[in-house]
Image (spheres, rainbow, N blue to C red):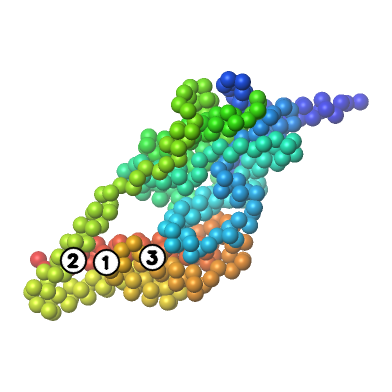
Amino acid sequence: MSDPSANANATAADALTGQPVAHVRRGDVEYVLLGTAHVSRVSADAVRAILEREPFDAVAVELCEPRFQSMRDPEAFRKLDLFQVIRQGKVGLVAANLALSAFQRRLADQFGIEPGAEMKAAIDGADARRLPVWLIDREIGVTLKRAYRSVGFLDRLSIIGGLGASVLTREDVGEDEIEKLKQGDLLGSMFNEFARESPPLYDALIGERDRYMAARLREQASGSSAKRVLVVIGAGHLAGIERELAMQNEMPGPLLEKLATPPPPSRWPKWIAIGVFVVIAAAIGFAFTRGVRAGTDALLAWTLFTGGFAALGAIAAAAHPLSVIAAFIAAPLKPFRPGIPASAISAGVEAWLRHPRVADFDTLRDDVAHWSGWWKNRIARTLLNFMFVTLGTLVGEYAAGFHIIKNLL
């Protein structure tokens, strides 16, 4: 008669065969690093197997607090205050999070496994064994800000393009490609070759997070009695975290603070924007010196170009007619309301007129997995409204300036 425990150990060993595992000892603590693919049934099975097979005092996962809460509470998006998102200028961050969710969802739908199943397996396994769960990853908002601000203009376009492509691309991904994620990272794979060709971008997406997660492990261990810790991470981080755990000498606290602080935004875009407006304002003023008719024509051009392109942005987002009108009126008045963009006004009107329904929150993650869902879901459509009106206003300002100056020459 076969021994059930022996069979269980054999099954666990089979599930772990070929999986990337590393052991690092630092002081009195042994870290067992298990590399996973973020959308892989094999990886989820490997997590369950290693917890079944080996004893641990704590389980660390590649999650930050917001992503952990989202995983714990599938209805977390119901708590999203759209007006607060618009008011605080966090539309881009929320949209980026949704784009990442869409990328995961596309892969998960194809292979019939929930995004982050391996992390959930780790958390559930820790709970079942009453082990503490350590959240070691940096917040994605900080990572994207540091990535965006650490690179030049072309690489910034790559970041935006990578996020957009994650929503628009509908090509099936082969299961062998899923397993290749074990050689990379979910964020890194979103930006594909852009991340590999840009050292600053790669460092912000991968290298800095390796240092951050190693420091978090050290910080958590210093306040714990744990002697053996299972660390469940994307396999693209395994080598980096293994190296950092062995070599880091800086105190964890100051290092974490440094890596969690976004670099200050570049000043040159702001100064360029101010310079462009000063030139346009001077051109309009100069036009009035040529006569009231010339000045009026210049002022009308400013109004029609900025308001028109902002309204086109709202129309492209399928906004309510009153949101389109709000964009048209607010865009030309930009100089008189600094700090309150036309996009915020138009998106605020959209959110007020088409207040999100419970169903919009319930289906948000699924809707954004397909590009058309961004227009169907009221929450996503409001975010699009903000972004498209922002782009339209910018295009309108430059078009207006070009038209006015051309007519004066």
Identify the mark at residue 343; answer none if there is no mark: 3
Q: Position of residue 127 (x, y in %)?
A: 72, 40
Secondary structure found at label 2: helix
Chain-order first, disc 2 or disc 3: 2
Res. 407 in view: no
Chain-order first, disc 1 or disc 3: 1
Res. 162 in view: yes
Identity, as a three-letter code, of the amino acid under mark 3: Ser
As measured in the structure, the alpha-carbon distance from the residue carrying label 1 to the one carrying label 3 is 14 Å
Which mark is in front, 1 or 3? 1
Chain-order first, disc 1 or disc 2: 2
Q: Is residue 56 above or below residue 289?
A: above
Is disc 1 in contact with disc 2, using a CB cutoff of under 8 Å? Answer: yes
Q: Position of residue 106 (x, y in %)?
A: 57, 50
Residue at 24% x, 62% y: name it: 398
From the image, tell me which residue sits under label 1.
335
The C terminus: image quadrant: bottom left
Relative to 271, 408 lies left or right = left
| Viewer-side residue, 10 vs 58 | 58
Secondary structure found at label 1: helix
Q: Is residue 234 above or below residue 398?
A: above
As measured in the structure, the alpha-carbon distance from the residue carrying label 2 to the one carrying label 3 is 22 Å
Secondary structure found at label 3: helix
Residue at 87% x, 26% y: name it: 3
| Image quadrant assignment for residue 54 | top right
| Image quadrant assignment for residue 288 | bottom left
| Image quadrant assignment for residue 250 | top left
Relative to 86, 172 lies left or right = right
From the image, tell me which residue sits under label 2.
281
Q: Is residue 96 above or below residue 380?
A: above
